[in-house]
Image: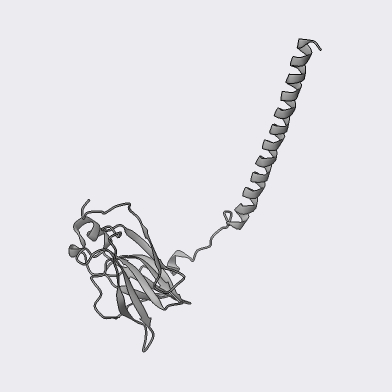
Amino acid sequence: IHLENLESVHWLSNSRSMSVCGWAVLAVAVALGYLVQANLGTLAYGKELGFAAAEACALHQLPTPCEDLTAFRPGALFAGGGDLWSTFALGSEQAVAGAIYLVEGTKVTPLPILGEPPKLVLHGIYFSARSRRLYGVNHDEATGESIEVFDVLEEDGVSLKHAGSIRSPLFANFALNDVVEGAVKDEVYVTEWQGGAFPAGG
């Protein structure tokens, strides 16, 4: 066999392996394209949302803004009120005390709270239908960053009983964002919106 024939055989072998790789890459790309297209329907990217007419909407004026809502029962929500902007700018001592509201359609009712929770400057809130507890991220500097826990009572209307506060050295000032209840008793998960402590005003 002459040397040029060996080079030709080597080149043919390389072109065949390149061809196999090309087909494999094309097959993977087609499979990925199919999966993406199939999941677009599942994720409802093309879904069109319908909203009520503007005149059907109502703006509720409350003493403090409500950062978060959580479902309570059909047609009813809890809203957590907290003067966050004043708190972040000037400190929680300067903030207007917040509250927890029951929202039923256009009716908003501040809920009575039994016990003595710290000043409420609520951020994220979560209601657990399983434990009948309401959790709220609270930014009160006087007592420290916390998760406030309330038992939801339904005797002669809805009210709350302060069950306790969860605090940790891991909870940096103004850093917590939201909370959910875990799968087992007294287990909660919290998220942060900042990676470290945030001093008032800065």
Looking at the figure, which quarter contains the N terminus? top right
- Where residue 106 appears, as percent x and y from the top left, is 40, 75
Of 174 and 74, nearer the camera is 174
Total numbered circles: 0
Quadrant of residue 61 within the rendered picture: bottom left
- Where residue 134 appears, as percent x and y from the top left, is 37, 74
* Vertical comparison of 16 with 48: above or below: above
- Where residue 81 appears, as percent x and y from the top left, is 31, 68
* Vertical comparison of 67 with 186: above or below: above
Q: Residue at x 67, y 45 (%)?
A: 31
Q: Is residue 41 left or right of residue 140?
A: right
Is residue 58 in view from this perspective?
no
- Furthest residue toward front: 1
Q: Is residue 21 left or right of residue 74?
A: right
Q: Residue at x 39, y 76 (%)?
A: 133
Of 32 and 183, nearer the camera is 183
Quadrant of residue 91 within the rendered picture: bottom left
Of 94 and 9, nearer the camera is 9
- Where residue 44 appears, as percent x and y from the top left, is 58, 57
Q: Residue at x 44, y 64 (%)?
A: 54
Q: Is residue 26 left or right of residue 164?
A: right
- Furthest residue toward bottom: 156
Quadrant of residue 82 within the rendered picture: bottom left
Q: Residue at x 50, y 63 (%)?
A: 51
Is residue 48 in view from this perspective?
yes
